[in-house]
Structure formats: structure tokens, C-alpha cells
């Protein structure tokens, strides 16, 4: 704080652009506009270097699930760092924090997932999932099963592999190679792909895209289908009822592994511990988590592995050439354990499912009448507001019309941070948000939509 008092925001902005390259950023725009410099945060609010208090409607990046400033997590980290600041897990060595966390994760994840592999980020959790799937099929004598199927509008990370699995075209643009084994099917995005169909009919159509792709590639060549329970960074896409049971049946029919990316959905975001439980996804082979695992107090991700895959690894043996220096980092695992303890003790997941989640959904649905809003989608404390140029014809804004950004800027001026994903604004506040704070969130969101609609002549 003392350092901040001595320096103006402009000083920090100048130093920021001088040496710090930001992720997912237009650096020309950053240089001309400067960054917001955050100084501290507490609960669901953060403050910037100009003293503005902002309700963090995006929970950091959908990750600060229990809110900011929890001293228990800081103390858990301090204790773990003092006891054992690092422990490699490669050479038949382990540590108590990683062991305890793997046990807890086996307990709280869906049945059949009893082994955890640790790394530092969601991207790495997905890398592990894909590498494990290929390794598994090789061990089982089916090395020809090497194709990966993912969905358009998926986001699975930013490493070379996960950027290409993600179904967001710029991710796999310049700065990437083509991967011949990665294939995409359309997302279950009803507003765009089946607006006039019933939920049931669209669920069947969207699931059929998976079966068609497996048959086109040949079932003996398909290793794994990777998907988020609901799609986050690709546009807040919530699948129709009936989609997931069909997808699971198709994976089973053709013996294609199912890897569920719970990086955003996990740890209460959906109103359940895992998004899988919210959509009745069971018997998955792999489940990837990060973000809410530590509420982002420490960088940690886990890839949960089913008994079927783990047994093959254990029974067939031979080194699996995969891992990271920080796999099972004791401090990160200690923070995760404390975070999970707090989530349980304070009944935070249940509160989202029974109280704030339904309240959030009512507020979201009430935005559907707005002239700028074509569709609203919500699950738990996650929602997407689809902006449209013309409601009747469902005409979307083009990439060159950053309307979502305009809505976010108008909200920020009024003390609310929103996320814009192209022409969708997403809301995913910390899970401890109260009903009063949700009232504030939605009154600001409506004002921001009104202001933007006025500039477009829609209001
Ligand atoms: N998977 C999903 C569903 C995500 O939303 C994200 C990040 O937003 C990732 C993977 C990548 O996680 P990370 O940024 O920690 O690598």
C-alpha cells in the first residue's frame, strides 16, 4: 500500500506497458489506454489505484469462488511453505498435502474417479487428459485410437495442443500448427443452431453430430471426446436437457473415452460441486479441474482418472512420460484442502443451488425483454447475455462491432466488472455473493445495456 500511495496510476501504467506483456490482450490498445491497476480485494469487491470499488462480477476469471481475502488460505499457504516448500513427485517421492488432497478429490468427485494427477493450470489439466487418453489406448493395444473430438466454441486452454482443441478460430490462427488428429463438431448452441426446434429435438440433433463424426472418422480411430458440461469462455452455452445422456450413450457405444473439462464448472459454479452433477454426467473416464479448486489463491489443477484407466496404468506398468515440476506442489495442495474445507463448512455450494442460483436465474431471465438482448442463459451462478443487432431476425453483431465491450465499459463505470465474450456478456460472480449484491449487479447490468442500446438507436 505504501508503494502505491507514492505512485500515481499513470506511473504504474507506464511501468506496466514498459515490461509486462499481458495475456489475451491487444497490446496496441493496452499501450494507448493503459491498464486498470488493482491494489487490493476483499470478499466480492476489488479496488483500483484510483480508489474505485468494483463488484467483481467475473470472480477474477470465474475462479475466485469463495471470494478474496480469506486469511485461512493465506495461513494454510504459509504453514505449508514453512514445512515443506517443495517436493518433487517423480522419483517415488510424495508429500502429505498432495496425498490428502487426492483422497479428498476422490471423495467429492463423481463415482469411479479415484486417482488424481496434479499440475498448475487448466490448460495443463487438459493436456494431461489428452496425453493420458492416447497413452491408455496404446497400453491397451489400440494405438490407432488417436483422434480427439471437441466442440466449436469450446475453450480448453492456451498451450499449443489445448488452443487447437478449443473451438475458437483465432486460438488456432497464426502462432499455431495444424493438428491432424483434432476434429470439431458444432456446439449445442440452440439460439444459433436450432432456435425453432424443441429442446428435445435439438438435444437429439446436437448429440447426433458427435455420432456422425465418430462414424466418419471410424470408431477405431477415436480416442476421446472432450467437452465442458456448459461452455464458458466460448460464449456461455448451456446445452439442452437430454443432450448429455445421449452424448454419454454414444461415447459408450463406440468406446470413445469421455473427458469432462470442469475447469470453470467445478467447485460450485453450477450449484453442484461439479457441473457434471448438474447435467447427470456419470461414468466419465477423465475429469479436469482448476480455478475453483483453490479459489485461485494458488495455481493448481487436477486431472481425475477413472478406475478403468488407472487400473491399466497400474497393471500394465512402464513409465508414463508425462509430468511437471510443480505436480503435487505442497503449498498449492494445502491451499486447495483449506478451500474445500471452507466450501463444505459454509455450505457455499448448497447456497448457490438453493438460494442465490435460482435468484440469479430469475434476474437473468428478466433481461430477456431488453431490445439489445437476443437470448439469456444461466446455470448456477453463471450466465450469458447474448447481444443482438436485430432481435426478430437473430442478427448478431460482427467481430468488428465490439458491443459486448461497450456494455462492460458502461458497467465498470458504475462499479461492476462484467466479462465480454464477443457478442455475449458473461456474469460469474464469486459464489458468496448475496441477494442484495445480485440486485445491485443486475440493476447496473440493465443500466449498461440501456446506455449501449441508446448509442445504437435501439432505445
Ligand atoms: N478449460 C476451461 C473450461 C477454461 O475456462 C479455461 C480457462 O478459462 C481453461 C480450460 C484453461 O485454464 P488455464 O487458463 O488455467 O490454463
Image (cartoon, rainbow, N blue to C red):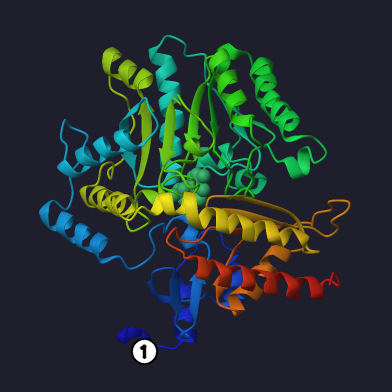
Residue 315: x and y in percent read: 27, 13
- In this view, which residue lies farthest toward the left? 83
Work out whether residue 404 can be spotted.
yes
Mark 1 residue element: helix
- Seen in the picture, residue 101 relative to 355 is either above or below; the reply is above
Q: What number of labels is visible? A: 1
Q: Residues within 10 Å of mark 1 (few under 14, many from 20)?
A: few
Query: Along the line of sight, which residue is nearer the eye, 418 or 364?
Result: 364
Work out whether residue 420 can be spotted.
no
Q: Quadrant of residue 1?
A: bottom left
- In this view, which residue lies farthest toward the top? 141
Q: Quadrant of the C terminus?
A: bottom right
**Disc 1 within 8 angstroms of ligand 1 (CB):** no
At x 58% / y 32%, what residue is drawn?
A: 179
109 left or right of 255 in image: left
At x 60% / y 41%, what residue is drawn?
A: 154
Query: Along the line of sight, which residue is nearer the eye, 369 or 289?
Result: 369
- In this view, which residue lies farthest toward the right? 393
Residue 214: x and y in percent read: 64, 19
- Seen in the picture, residue 52 relative to 46 is either above or below; the reply is below
65 left or right of 362 in image: left
Q: Which residue is mark 1?
A: 5
Residue 15: x and y in percent read: 44, 78
Residue 123: x and y in percent read: 45, 43
Q: Quadrant of residue 81?
A: bottom left
Query: Along the line of sight, which residue is nearer the eye, 238 or 94?
Result: 238
237 left or right of 416 in image: right
- Seen in the picture, residue 309 relative to 48 is either above or below; the reply is above
At x 51% / y 59%, what residue is drawn?
A: 23
Query: Along the line of sight, which residue is nearer the eye, 406 or 114?
Result: 114
Amino acid at each position: 500500500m505504501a508503494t502505491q500511495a507514492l505512485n500515481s496510476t499513470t506511473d504504474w501504467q507506464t511501468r506496466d506497458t514498459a515490461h509486462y506483456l499481458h495475456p489475451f490482450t491487444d497490446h496496441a490498445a493496452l499501450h494507448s489506454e493503459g491498464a486498470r491497476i488493482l491494489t487490493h480485494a476483499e470478499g466480492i469487491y476489488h479496488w483500483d489505484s484510483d480508489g474505485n470499488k468494483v463488484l467483481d462480477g467475473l470472480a477474477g476469471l470465474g475462479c475466485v469462488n469463495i471470494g478474496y481475502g480469506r486469511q485461512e488460505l493465506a495461513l494454510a499457504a504459509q504453514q505449508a511453505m514453512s514445512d515443506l516448500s517443495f517436493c518433487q513427485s517423480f522419483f517415488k517421492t510424495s508429500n502429505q498435502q498432495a496425498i490428502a488432497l487426492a483422497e479428498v478429490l476422490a471423495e467429492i468427485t463423481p463415482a469411479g474417479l479415484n486417482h488424481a494427477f496434479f499440475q498448475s493450470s487448466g490448460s495443463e489439466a487438459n493436456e494431461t487428459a489428452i496425453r493420458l487418453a492416447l497413452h491408455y489406448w496404446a497400453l491397451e493395444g489400440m494405438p490407432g485410437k488417436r483422434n480427439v473430438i471437441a466442440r466449436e466454441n469450446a475453450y480448453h486452454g492456451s498451450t499449443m495442443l489445448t488452443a487447437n482443441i478449443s473451438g475458437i478460430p483465432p486460438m488456432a490462427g497464426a502462432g499455431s500448427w495444424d493438428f491432424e488428429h483434432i476434429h470439431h463438431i458444432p456446439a449445442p448452441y440452440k439460439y444459433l443452431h436450432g432456435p425453432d426446434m424443441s429442446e428435445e429435438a435439438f438435444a437429439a440433433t446436437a448429440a447426433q453430430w458427435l455420432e456422425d463424426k465418430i462414424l466418419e472418422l471410424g470408431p477405431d480411430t477415436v480416442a476421446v471426446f472432450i467437452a465442458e458440461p456448459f461452455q464458458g469462455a466460448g460464449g456461455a452455452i448451456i446445452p439442452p436437457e437430454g443432450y448429455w445422456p445421449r452424448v454419454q450413450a454414444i461415447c459408450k457405444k463406440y468406446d470413445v473415452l469421455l473427458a469432462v473439462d470442469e475447469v470453470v464448472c467445478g467447485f460450485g459454479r453450477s450449484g453442484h460441486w461439479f457441473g457434471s452433477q448438474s447435467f447427470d454426467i456419470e461414468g466419465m473416464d477423465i475429469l479436469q479441474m482448476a480455478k475453483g479448486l483453490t479459489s485461485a489463491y494458488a495455481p493448481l489443477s487436477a486431472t481425475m482418472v477413472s478406475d478403468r484407466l488407472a487400473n491399466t496404468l497400474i497393471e500394465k506398468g512402464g513409465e508414463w512420460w508425462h509430468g511437471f515440476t510443480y505436480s503435487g506442489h505442497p503449498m498449492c495442495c494445502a491451499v486447495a484442502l483449506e478451500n474445500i474445507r471452507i466450501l463444505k463448512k459454509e455450505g457455499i455450494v448448497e447456497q448457490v443451488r438453493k438460494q442465490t442460483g435460482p435468484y440469479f436465474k430469475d434476474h437473468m431471465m428478466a433481461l430477456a425483454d431488453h431490445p439489445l438482448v437476443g437470448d439469456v442463459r444461466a446455470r448456477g451462478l453463471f450466465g450469458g447475455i447474448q447481444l443482438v443487432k436485430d432481435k426478430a431476425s437473430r442478427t448478431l453483431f460482427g467481430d468488428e462491432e465490439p458491443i459486448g465491450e461497450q456494455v462492460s465499459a458502461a458497467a465498470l463505470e458504475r462499479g461492476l466488472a462484467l466479462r465480454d465474450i464477443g457478442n455475449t456478456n458473461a456474469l460469474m460472480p464469486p459464489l458468496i455473493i448475496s441477494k442484495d449484491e445480485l440486485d445491485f449487479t443486475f440493476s447496473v447490468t440493465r443500466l449498461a445495456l440501456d446506455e449501449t442500446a441508446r448509442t445504437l438507436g435501439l432505445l
